[in-house]
Amino acid sequence: MPTPTMEDYIEQIYLLIETKGYARVSAIAEALQVQPSSVTKMVQKLDKDEYLNYEKYQGLVLTPKGKRMGKRLVYRHELLEQFLRLIGVNEENIYTDVEGIEHHLSWNSIDRIGDLVQFLEEDNDRIEQLKQIQRISDKNE
């Protein structure tokens, strides 16, 4: 299992490849706000663990294992953002909250959150009832 830091790198590399078609050390460093030397060390570790193939000065390519993991990590991040929006978390808190919790939830918990999001979105009345509860709660604070 990758560490939370490894997950951050895999997720970012996956996103860069999906949006730009490639992921360079400099772009990864900028996105994660780390030094390029840190990226190089992690990329070498991810290569050793078979999440990607890396050749110095040649760039990197995610392996099928890395692509699967990257896709799953992006799904987790997007699902948690969707969930927090749905339950009424203030927009300015969502990114920080997701970054704070995404590595601490089991995949079982992520799957159950996905079920809950689907359940709530299947019927707008459920979402409206939740908003009514929140309005009452906000008035009582």
Image (cartoon, helix red, strand yellow):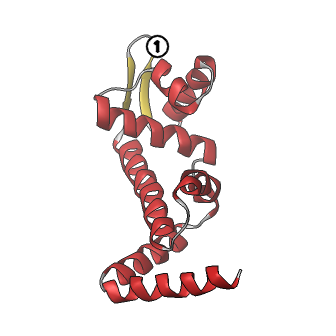
Q: Is residue 94 above or below residue 6?
A: below
Please, what is the three-letter code of the amino acid marked with disc 1? Answer: Lys
**In the shown orientation, is residue 34 left or right of residue 91?**
right
x 62%, y 48%: residue: 4
What residue does disc 1 label?
Answer: 56
Does residue 49 sit above or below 35 in this rendering? below
Tell which residue pokes out farthest to the right in this image.
141
Locate residue 117 relative to residue 9 in the image: left or right: left
Rendered view: 11 above or below 27: below
Q: Position of residue 74 (x, y in %)?
A: 42, 51
- Number of numbered discs on residues: 1
Specify the quadrant that holds the C terminus. Answer: bottom right
Q: Point out residue 124 in the picture as x, y percentages from the top left corner.
A: 32, 83
Residue neighbourhood size for the residue with mark 1, other residues' Cα within 10 Å, grouped as few (<14), some (14–19), many (≥20): few
- In the image as oriented, which residue stretches furthest toward the front? 139
Residue 48 to residue 59: above or below:
below
Q: Secondary structure at mark 1?
A: loop
Q: Position of residue 38 (x, y in %)?
A: 63, 23
One can see residue 50 in this view:
no
Residue under the point 49% across and 18% down: 26
The single residue placed furthest to the top in the displayed view is 57
The answer to whether one can see residue 19 in this image is yes
Residue at (46, 23) in percent of width and height: 27
Report which quarter residue 89 is drawn in.
bottom right
